[in-house]
Image (cartoon, rainbow, N blue to C red):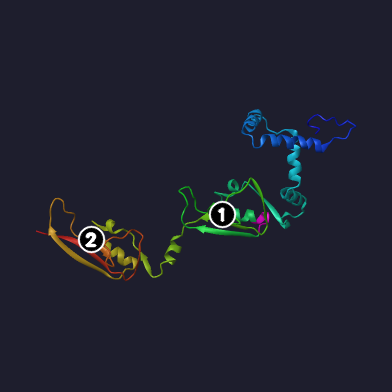
Amino acid sequence: MHFTGLNKATIAEANVEAFIEQAIQYKELIEGNKINKAMEFYMFSDITHPLNAVRAYEIKEWDKSKSFSNTKIYLSSKDITTCENLPLVDITDRYIGKDYLFVETELTKIGFSNVELVRKIRPDSKKNEPSHVVEIAINGKTTFEDADWYSRDSIIEVAYYLPESDEEVAAAHPGQIKIPNSSKGYIGINYDDVVVELKELGFTNISTFEQEGKKSLLSRKENCIVRISINGHNQFETGAWFDCDAAIRITYNTFSN
């Protein structure tokens, strides 16, 4: 009320209720009327603060809110980690894209007791970086207000991207060997070199077969692979896993005079 011009030296007692009533009437005038709402936007587009009566009204409403009660308790507490409710501000900007261990530490320092790490071995997008947080969920929600309060025992799930290491992938395929090339990639390679490579990897059931043909200008070099199959499959991708005793059949070319 002083902001509006009430002189501190005025002896008469100010009528707070009447001052607040101005804001109530103003809000009733604006709400539900598109023309008045548009005029308000035009009149106040370059002003940083609302009308003083409206500011007073909003402050009194906030005074009744749970948010204000939480704020008072939080600011007056000597040990904020013991507060029943804790604030989180700018959750997305502060935590998404940060290292997941850093985020876990920060949330624990604030006082949250149920921080769960959720690993994703496949990225949600090409922008995801290893060990970086890709999503935050609090009690199942992934969208947040600018400044929300949460109970200290809220379930906070921190999802982060971390692809499987070579050791983890190998552990998921006990007794198997990863093929270093595709069926298409082996075509045209000297069969002896491939046999040596596969044996060094640990494959034990390798058979080779000649395919005789006449040499021409279009022919590849002699003793090159023309077909390879594993367990009867003529097509397989680089990085596929097979048992060490998988049946590998290699057909290579030889030329007659």
Whether residue 54 is visible? no
- Measured along the vertical axis of the image, is residue 17 above or below residue 229? above
Measure the alpha-carbon separation of dots 2 and 1.
47 Å
Q: Are marks 2 and 1 in contact (CB under 8 Å)?
A: no
| Residue 199 x/y as whole percent | 30, 67
| Residue 102 x/y as whole percent | 59, 53
Q: Amino acid at mark 1?
A: Tyr
> Chief secondary structure of the magenta span?
helix
State the extent of the magenta-drawn residues as a range. Answer: 108-112
Question: Viewer-proximal residue, 124 or 133?
Answer: 124
Q: Is residue 28 left or right of residue 171?
A: right
Q: Where, by quadrant of the figure, is residue 30 drawn?
A: top right
Question: Viewer-proximal residue, 102 or 17?
Answer: 17
Could you say whether the residue bearing mark 1 is in a helix, strand or loop? Answer: helix
Mark 2 vs 1, N-terminal side: 1
Whether residue 104 is visible? yes
- Measured along the vertical axis of the image, is residue 228 above or below residue 106? below
Could you say whether the residue bearing mark 2 is in a helix, strand or loop? Answer: strand
Give the labeled residue for mark 2.
227
Give the labeled residue for mark 1.
100
Residue located 34% across and 62% down the image: 179
Q: Amino acid at mark 2?
A: Arg
| Residue 223 x/y as whole percent | 19, 60
